[in-house]
Image: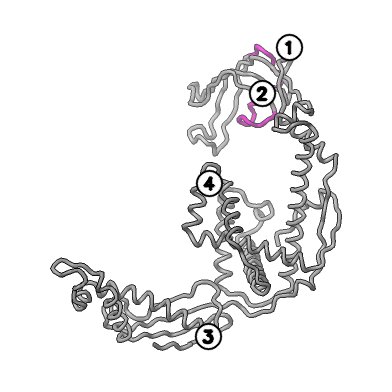
Amino acid sequence: MEIKELAAEGLSHTFSIKVSKEDLSTKLDSKIKEMQPQVSLKGFRPGKVPTSHIRKMFGQSIMKDIVEETVNETTQQAINDNKIRPAGNPKVDLRANGEDVTQGKADLEYQLTVESIPEFEPVDPEKLKFTRLTCPSDDKSVDERLTEMAQGQKSYKKKAKTAKAKKDDAVLIDFVGTVDGVAFDGGTMEGHQLVLGSGSFIPGFEDQLIGAKAGDEIDVKVTFPDPYQSADLAGKDAVFATKVIEVQGAKDAVIDDEFAQKFGLADLAALKEAVKSQFDAELDMQSRMKLKRAILDELDKKHKFDLPPGMVEAEFTNIWQQVQAEKEAGQLDEDDMKKTDKQLEKDYRKIAERRVRLGLVLAEMGQKHDIQITNEELQQGMIAEARQYPGQEQQVIEFYQKNPQAIAQLRAPIYEEKVVDLIVEKATVTDKEVDRETLFEEDPML
């Protein structure tokens, strides 16, 4: 076997690797002898098939496995001998004819290209300083949240027959929808309660019922949006022959013990405590997110080193595919919509570089401080992920158990959070109390 380094440019290393056909043949002989006792063929006693016959029947197939194993072994040897920490999967370029190699007619020759993780010294977390924004919950915030909950528990009571419907009232209606005089599927309903101003119907429908009273019959004329969930109706004009059965006035729920019991709690005091705990959790999470962003910004600022081009390109490709999908769906950020593809590509390539840089820094810091992920933490991560798919929890967990790559993706954010915890523990962190608006103020993209 011959391993020669052809080039070393920056973080990229290229090797020429050659394994003679004689060495491969020796491996083949060894493999055949190893498997001979288990081979059973018609015309031979079990375990007594001659090695020459096995070689003739299965030699090329076995050699394919040997070549694959040899490429993996020699690749790892080249990496180990040159003390390279690979950044991503090495690239293998076979130089010999694959058919000739597996038939034992040619040496195995290939060119190996591998990018290495850059050498750098991560910043000492004990030398870092951060300000943690905090915002304690108060009675006013809790009361506001209870009011929102009460609004979501509105009840509606029948008004007098002469009462005219206004915004936020509900109307009980029968209707039949037609396009060009023909009723369409899903356009007919009886006794439907519609809250005016809810925006739950086709644009313009609810507005035409404001001012209506019980007994009124109204032809509501609308145009279906384009696109629309039913392609047959998209962009078409429609008429809904609508009869108002009654007008109902809204009434907010009374915030008392009975209201609390609707949420499974004993009394109003227990509900207030539950709301306060939820509020505190939201504020703590946002405070943590702000602090983490400050930590990542500082780590990005403190470290400057060459990045593995392959890692950057892979990260950028993932980001760019998402950006293009959002663009096609008309869901791009308002600022991004104003930019050209060239400017977007430039901006998101910077984001890819930042993510790769921070990933390498966090990994190096974690390794230096012996951060480990326990099986219990992975299990908790799987359970948390599974809970996002009610009714499919077992399938989600089985998916992770059968897919090492999925487990690796689950491990990464857990590892990142543990490194952030390490930095918070060792750095100088000063708390600063701010209002809710400041705490939830949106950070810039980079």
Picture disc at residue 82: 3
Which of labels 3 and 4 is toward the front?
Answer: 4
Instruction: Name the residue carrying label 1.
Output: 160
Which of labels 2 and 1 is toward the front?
Answer: 1
Residues at marks 2 and 3 touching, judged by CB atoms closer than 8 Å: no
Mark 2 is surrounded, within 10 Å at the Cα level, by few (under 14), some (14 to 19) or many (20 or more) other residues, namely some
Separation of disc 2 and disc 4 at Cα?
A: 46 Å
Image position of 198 with respect to 346: above or below: above
Between disc 2 and disc 4, whose residue precedes? 2
Give the amino acid at mark 2.
Answer: Gln
Separation of disc 4 and disc 1 at Cα?
A: 50 Å
Image position of 409 with respect to 56: above or below: above
Separation of disc 3 and disc 4 at Cα?
A: 45 Å
Image position of 89 with respect to 395: above or below: below
Instruction: Name the residue carrying label 4.
Output: 393
Picture disc at residue 189: none
State the scheme by which the image is colored: one colour
Residues at marks 3 and 1 touching, judged by CB atoms closer than 8 Å: no
Quadrant that contains the C terminus: bottom right
Label 3: element kind? loop
Q: Which residues are magenta?
A: 197-216
Residues at marks 2 and 1 touching, judged by CB atoms closer than 8 Å: no
Instruction: Name the residue carrying label 2.
Output: 208
Between disc 3 and disc 4, whose residue precedes? 3
Image position of 71 with respect to 209: above or below: below
Whether residue 6 sits left or right of residue 161 in the image: it is: left
Mark 1 is surrounded, within 10 Å at the Cα level, by few (under 14), some (14 to 19) or many (20 or more) other residues, namely few
Between disc 3 and disc 1, whose residue precedes? 3
Mark 3 is surrounded, within 10 Å at the Cα level, by few (under 14), some (14 to 19) or many (20 or more) other residues, namely few
Give the amino acid at mark 4.
Answer: Glu
Q: Position of residue 344 (x, y in %)?
A: 63, 61
Separation of disc 2 and disc 3 at Cα?
A: 77 Å
